[in-house]
Structures are given as C-alpha cells and as structure tokens.
Amino acid sequence: MIQIDEKGFYGKFGGAYIPEMLHPNIEELRENWEQIVASPDFQEEFQMLLRDFVGRPTPLYFASRLSEKHGAKIYLKREDLCHTGAHKVNNTVGQIILAKKLGKKRIIAETGAGQHGVATATVCALMGMDCTVYMGALDIQRQRPNVERMKILGAKVVPATSGSQTLKDATNEAMRQWINNPVDTHYIIGSVVGPHPYPEMVARFQSVISQEIKTQLLEKEGTPNPDIVIACVGGGSNAAGAFYHYYNVPQVRLVAAEAAGLGINSGKSAATTVLGTPGVLHGSKTLLMQTEDGQVVEPHSISAGLDYPGIGPVHAHLHDIGRAEFVAVEDEDAMKAGIELSRLEGIIPAIESAHAIHALNMIQYQKDDVIVINLSGRGDKDLETYIKWGGY
Ligand SMILES: *Cc1c(COP(=O)(O)O)cnc(C)c1O
C-alpha cells in the first residue's frame, strides 16, 4: 500500500525538515488543508474552474500510428491541452482556492524554467491576488518568454542572486520570504516536493489525471485499468497525478521516466534514482544528487522541467519498494521521441513529455498491452530547444 503517515512519510521518505520559524505556516496548512479541500464549497469551485478555466477533462487519445509502430495499444492523456500548456495549472488552481479560504492575500512561488511561475501568475490574475515569483537570476536570462508572460499577467518576478542563481536559490529565497510574511502569504509549491503536507496536497490536486483516465479507459476498453502507465518525473507531480489512483492496483505497472541528460556517467544528468542518495532537499527526506559532504550537485537535462536534483518523496518510496519501474532517458533520445510523436500523431510534445514517449523503447511489454502515456505538456515553450538541437 502506498500511504502517507501522520508525519508525512511514505515509508522512509517525506516528513517536514524545516526551520523553527516556518513551523506556524506549515502547521496552519497541515491542520486545515484536508478539511478545506473536502468541503463542498471548495469542490464546487475547484471542479468549475477545472472544467471552464483549465479545460478538463482532457482527452484520452488513442494514438493509432504510434501504437502500430510500437505494437501496443497506446493512449495519450492530453495534459498538453490544459490552459497554459501543461498539467501544472491543476495544482495552482487548487492551491489558490485553498489560499483564499485560508484568508491569504498574497501569493509567492519559486520557479526554475518559469512554467510553474506562469501557472501561478495565471491563477493569481484569475483571483485578483498579489503575486511574487522568485527565480534564479541566471534562469531569468535563459527563460525570457516565461518571464515576460508572468509580467503580462501582473506578477512581480524577483531574481535570486545567491549561489548558482537557479531553482534551488529561488526556492531558498521564497522560503525566506514566507518566514517573514507568515500571516497574509501563501507559498504555492509547484511539484510533489517540499515539506509535508505539500507533496500529498499537490498529488491530490493532480490526481484528477488518473481519476479521468479510469473513467475514460472504462469507456474505451471496458476496464479502468491499463497494463502500464508511463510518465516523466522532474519533481514528480504529473507522474503522481497519473499514478495516484493506481498506486494500490498492483496489476497496473507504473513506469517513471527520469532525465539522464548527456548520460548517467557524464556528470551532466538528472537521473536521481540512479545517482541519488537519501538526504534532505527543500524540507523533505528524499533521494537527491549530492556530494559526499552533502552539497547538492547541479543537475542537467535538455528539458528545463526535469532539471531538478531530487524527486518527490513518494517517488523515492515507489523506487525503494519497487512499485514503480524507473528508466533514465538521454537528451538525444528524448528529442528524437519528440520528433517521432510530432510526425506520427501531429502532436509536438514538451521535451519533458518526450522522455515518457522514449520510455516505450526501454521497457518490456506484451503485444497489444494497453499503455497510457501522460503527455504532461505541449512543445510550444520548447521551440527554441528543438531549433537549437536541429535534428529533424
Ligand atoms: C514542470 C513540468 C514537468 C516536470 O514536473 P513534474 O512535477 O515532475 O511533473 C513535466 N512536464 C512539463 C510539461 C512540465 O512543465
């Protein structure tokens, strides 16, 4: 059974490793979130916004040409058709309603590539809430279009200038700001990471993905259960959403695709389950890439969304107990899979999602197995990367 305990642990991983000053904020969330989320009031607004703002349910699309090529029945869960172009908005919609119900006036968030920043700025505009997004100074230079999107939406983008000036520094800065503004501010974390209760809360908001897959597959295949579900893992929120209602259905295989970057042994990788060891990252105990003295190793992936030195604690647990199979997909193979999907199905995927497509080549399955691949996002944001790579 995949279950979270009182203290926020999935097996050995999870918990809340936070500075004393953050306790009141985390306690307030921990004590209230489940009750608020379960209330009819919350659910009515959440379901309405998922439907009318995000555009849910997203289709479960039978990819016939991809199926023919790989000798399986392959369905794509079309999170790429969500408003803003990826699954992230499912979580930010949930958290902004929660923040409102907690009486918060201000939202802060961290972002690496800017996707979570955009999803957060979007829901803040929707609700008329003040929004500040912390972003590494280097990332601000590298991700200009998303910075401008956030600004158009009315958010303030604040550079984090310490350390490597990337995601982990932005996260530290957001945490610091939250400690300083505990009463009126809610911190929207973008994946199934961070201190308890964030990983479970974000997974719950994303679990709409597997909820819909069950209904849609029942209609199309006469059973809610596929043989295999495949999703890419950065922090792991789209995978947690796609796996959630199958965690405890043992006949459904769960496959997680991590980013191997230039290769597992290249020193430029983000394959956390291969290269990582247990430690504490962003407030929870999990697997992370670190040096022997505990310094976080700078990860690399061609896809900004998988360029993260850890994974959410639930994935560390799924790996630990062997409930999910993990594969590590190299940059080059992911790019080729992105082109393959574009040419076979007329869908240009986010490069993150292309990792999940390539996983088809790395696992064993029977002919005519039903495989659901979670297509976490669309490729529009990655056009520059496709162009620079050029292999099409
Ligand atoms: C952010 C992102 C990811 C990685 O985040 P998870 O929390 O692992 O889902 C994957 N795909 C897309 C399109 C993203 O924007």
Image (tube, rainbow, N blue to C red):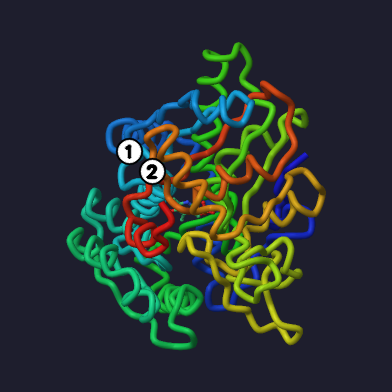
Residue lying farthest front?
A: 392
Query: How far apart are the two marked residues, 1 and 2, measured between alpha carbons?
Result: 20 Å
Tell me what residue is drawn at x 46 percent, y 58 percent.
Answer: 190
Q: Using the rendered view, name the quadrant where residue 67 is placed.
A: top right
Where residue 337 appears, x then y in whole percent?
52, 46
Residue 354: percent from the left, percent from the top? 50, 48
Q: Return the residue nearer the eye: 339 or 360.
A: 339
Q: Residue at x 37, y 56 (%)?
A: 382
Vertical order, 141 against 38 (above or below): below
Q: Confirm whether residue 194 shows in the render.
A: yes
Classify mark 1: residues with Cα within 10 Å, few (<14), some (14-19) or many (20+): many
Residue lying at the far right in this picture: please name it. Answer: 321
- Residue 178 appears at what percent x and percent y? 43, 73
Q: Which one is nearer the viewer's eye here, 87 or 303?
A: 303
In the image, what residue type sits under mark 2? Answer: Ile
Badges 1 and 2: C-beta atoms under 8 Å apart? no
Q: Is mark 1 within 8 Å of ligand 1?
A: no
Asked whether the viewer can see residue 179, the reply is no
Question: Mark 2 sits on what residue?
Answer: 348
List the residue tagged with mark 1: 54
